[in-house]
Structures are given as structure tokens and as C-alpha cells.
Image (cartoon, rainbow, N blue to C red):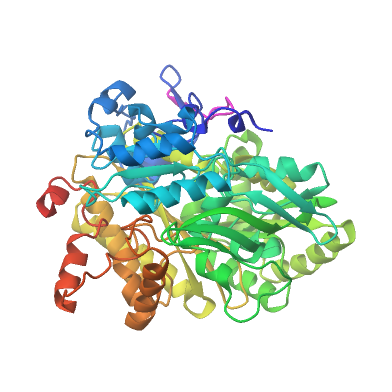
Amino acid sequence: MDKRMITDAFEEIKWNGWGDTGVCIKYDEARQLPIHTNGKPMKHLLKFMKDDVLKVKGEFKIKPTPGLTKEEAIKRLPPPVVKQPFVDELRQVLSKDQIRLDAYARLTHIFGKNYRDLWRVRRGMIDRPPDAVILPNNHDDCVKIMELAQKHNVVVVPFGGGTNVTGGVEPNPFETRRMVISIDMRRMGRMLHIDTESGTAVFEVGVLGPDIDEQLSRYGFMMGHDPDSYAYSTLGGWIAARGSGAMSNKYGDIENMILAMRVVTPVGVVETPLTSRPCGVDLNAMFVGSEGAFGLVTEAVVKIERIPEVKRYEGWLFPSFEVAFTAFHTCTRKGIHPCTMRLYDEDDTRLSFAASTDSGLVSTFFSKCFKKYIATVKGWNLSKISLVVVGFEGTKAQTNCQRSELVGVFQAFGATCLGTKPGNTWQEKKYDLPYLRDFALAHNFWADVFETSVLYTDAIHCWRAVKKSFAEVMAENGKNAWIGCHTAHQYRFGCCLYFTFIGGQADENDLKIFLQVKKRAMEVMLQHRGNLTHHHGIGYEHVPWMKRYNGEGGLDAIMKFKKALDPKNICNPGKLLPSPPSEKETPKATQARQNREMMFDKMGIPGALQAHL
């Protein structure tokens, strides 16, 4: 089992960035080259930042923008709000090492890993850290913690791997009087049972992605859930955020993998029934995507998959994003479902090649001969080329049959196969994006992502409109920046659009531009029948649009469900839902207070939070 199951994970990973301490993309000053975590140079990345992001001419050198040291950040921590009777009773039921009140534990459980989170922690903009970090060892510990939290009116914030990018693990800064505890679930990483005949397994939800598959592999199985955060995120986090993995076309999203679960709520334990198909109201569906707002998920029964005989991933080039998208849709309509179909638009394609360390593939793409072939023989516009990665898993017969059908469709749309090298490179580098984001933050750039799920009818229109809205925000602010998009997770009726955007750092007003981008993009996505998020979760980032998305009646039903399970609102307040109405409060007064207590437009904006506190 991974060593992180023995020592506490938060003591070994970065408090101000992604991944293990010491692992990052470094900058070689002498050669003026970024060096990948694998030790290879990223020869084309700086040119991409210069030409595509900043759009500047002449000489270009990146500038380091170091953040605070750990010691400096700890000095910025506000004093904790400690409810001593709660702590005293907790010490009677848990061991000493399970209750952490020290500054470093608090520092490492404030934020997730999006741009806004890391931008603030690097500058010491710490508004509301947890007052203590609690580390349960099992389900029974969680029951004891929740019972005491309910008794003493202590706020409970679940914490899995801390990889959330929508503010889902950050304590609500409007909780100025109640004690807030962060429940770090990562000691709960055991497989409790496996049923190889039915193809199910029971896990504690603090288990990390690699540890799930390591424990299952002893029996010839895997889970098949492979998000970008795989190495550092937990099963509980996937459930909380309604996660999705790169191979969802074959193995499903997380809601398709969860068969039953145990949930510790303030009013008792809910155990959803295990069967081959739910009947009546599906209780699992009530908790998947709930982000700890209804209670702590402690254990889950998941479906498991045989480790496939064959895994084949390959790359293709299409003349444009629109043409490739039509080819994808044609495959879906024909029932051709590779486990992965990932399509990058022309901008994301350039980033993919620029960030690669595969010198052979990149040299081929940038070579004069290849460009001449594409332009003259194929007749393609070089600036519009789109990269596609497809993956097949299963038996040899299954994968050969599926690939044969897909090749027929792709070739009908004029695509060129690049072979397995791009596919294998993608498999090796698919967890790299957070490291690129950290490199950008440390060298005078900012970068972040957002995503949505749309119907096929609206997808291309939505893609164009989002990119147009981004360009308009940048033009209004006199800035140059870059945005790219890829699509994946194909369903019968629609797919995911995933946007990445990068700009140059200027001052503390950068975050205001970031919020303009997010607001404008969200409005555009909703206008095109997109949802608020495909797999990143609601957190506090998307709460302002929950009423519009669910409707007044729908939101009211969800809030009443929360009220029934969490009458004191101790479970992750400020996330997923707006603040609950108070007794005798008029609807108008409730709306005004909810707007004041929205975290989205205040976190990281100088003076915004204090003005409302």
C-alpha cells in the first residue's frame, strides 16, 4: 500500500501547490528552459507563452513570482475559535494524534487547488482556516465526531485529497463564532470486502485513487475511474463532487459506479441498500454530488472491472475542431464508444504540443516537411488543426472491432492517424496540467479551468460563445490572454466542454478579471443549456447560479432535505447551497442576506469580505 496510508498525507504534499513536496516543473536559468517533472526540457513552452498568451514581439524572459514561505504563511493565520468542551469530549473518544490543533495542520486544510486558492495562499490572504483538523480512523470515529459536533454546534467540513477546484473544502468565512473542524478522511483507506463474483467491493472513502487500484489488482480487478487528480484525490471526494474520469465512456461516471454507501449525518447514520438496481427513490443519488452538505460519506460499495487484456491509445489529427466534433458525434450515434475520446480545439492543440517533452512527436509536428504535407497535400489550415486522443480497452477482439469501426468514421472525415505514440504520451502526461498551472503562478502568469456539460445541438455554439466572451473580457481590460478547450465524456445526448485559460499577472486586481471571466462564461453556458459543472462540483464558486439552474421549487426541495438531515447547518455551510432562511425572516430579507453571504464574489477580492463582515 502507498506510504501515504501510513503517514498523514497533508504532511508530505505541498501546502501551496500541487503534488508531493519538491516535485514541480523547474526553470533552468542557464538554458532558459522549463524542465518537466520527468527531467526532460519543455522546449516549446516559453514560445507558446510569448506568442499565444502574451502575444508580444521581441525578446521574452519569464519573471519569478515567489509566494510566502511556510513560516510567513503560518504567521498570517487568524487565532482559532476553540470550543473547549467539544475538544475535551473529543479527546475522550479519539486518540491524541487524531486531533490536530497545530498551525501547520490548519494551514494545509484551508484551500483546494484552483487558481483563486493558490493565488491567495501564496500571498497570505487567509480569511478563515479551520480551527482544528480531525483524522478519523474508521466509520465509528466519524459517528462519534458528528454526534459531538451536533451536540456542541461545531461546523464540520469534509476533506479528502484537498484537490477540489470550486471552493468545496474551504471554511465559510462568515462562520466567525462557531468552531470549524476539517475532517481529513485519508486515514480511512482500506478495502473492507470484495465480491469477485458480483464484481463489487467495499471501500472506506478516504482511499486515494492509486491505492484503490493497488488493492483491487491483487484480485485482477480495477475501478476504472481515472480523473486528472487521480494520484491525490479520494473516493469520498469523487462522490462529493460527482466526479468523472478519463475513461468514463466505457466505465461510467462516479454515480454509475456507486452501488451503496454509509453516510453519517447530524441526525443519524443513513445506509443505502445494496442491490443490482434501486427501486423507488434512489438514496444514492441524494448524496452523490452533495459535497458534505448533508453529512459525511464514510464507506461505499463500488462496481469493479476486470483489468483489460488490451489497452491501446492513439492520436489523430483533424482539419478543425468542428470537423472532429462531427466525427465524434457520428461515432456516438453509431454506438461506437471507445473508453476515451478526447478532442482538443486548435488552441488546446498548440498547448498540448508546446507542453510536450516528446521530442520526436513535437519535432514532427513543427517540422517544415510535416507542415508542407498538411498544407499542400491535405489542404488544411495549419492554424485550425485539432488533435484527438482515443483509447480502447477490453479483449483483443473487442478493441480490434471497435477500432475498425472508428477508423472508418474518422477517415470519412479526412483524419490522419498519428499512431500510438501520441496516445502513450498522453497516458504518461495526463496528470500534468496542475503542475503547469503551478509553474505559471510561480512565473508571473495565472491559469485556471472551468467546464460544463451540454447537449450536442448546443455544443459548438457554446464553445464559440464562451471563447468570444473570454476575448471580450480581456479586450475590455486591455489584456492579452489565451483560452483553449477540449471535449470528452461523450453521452448519448451530449458531452463535456472543458476550458483552460491563461494570462499574465499584473497586481491584486487580477482576481477581479478572473471573476469577470467566470461570470461571463457561466452566463453564456447557461444560455446554451449547459450545466454549472460537469465534474468539478458546486463548492461556493457555483452557488450564485444554483437557483437559476434548479428553479425555485427545485432549490427549495434540496434545502428542505438538508434541513431534515442537518437542522443546525453544521455540515459544510456556504457550499452547494445558499444560506438557509432564518425563522421569521421575510423572503426579501433572506435573499439579501444570502447575497451578502455568497463567497463567490468576495474571496480574494481586497476588502470585499471585510465590508460584509
- The residue at the point 79 percent across, 59 percent down is 199
**Residue 409, how many percent across, how many down?**
72, 71
| Residue 98 as seen in the image, left or right of residue 603 | right
**Hey, which residue is sitting farthest top in the picture?**
30
Based on the picture, tell me whether residue 340 belongs to the magenta stretch. Answer: no
**Hey, which residue is sitting farthest left in the picture?**
611
Name the dominant secondary structure of the magenta segment: loop
Q: Say if residue 284 shows up in the picture.
A: yes
| Residue 273 as seen in the image, left or right of residue 149 | right
**Residue 238, how many percent across, how many down?**
54, 54
**Residue 328 found in image quarter:** bottom right
**Residue 285, how many percent across, how many down?**
55, 70
Which range is magenta? 32-42
Compared to residue 285, the image places residue 605 above or below, namely: above
- Where the N terminus falls, by quadrant? top right
Based on the picture, tell me whether residue 35 belongs to the magenta stretch. Answer: yes
Compared to residue 324, the image places residue 432 above or below, namely: above
Q: Say if residue 535 shows up in the picture.
A: no
- Report the number of numbered marks: 0
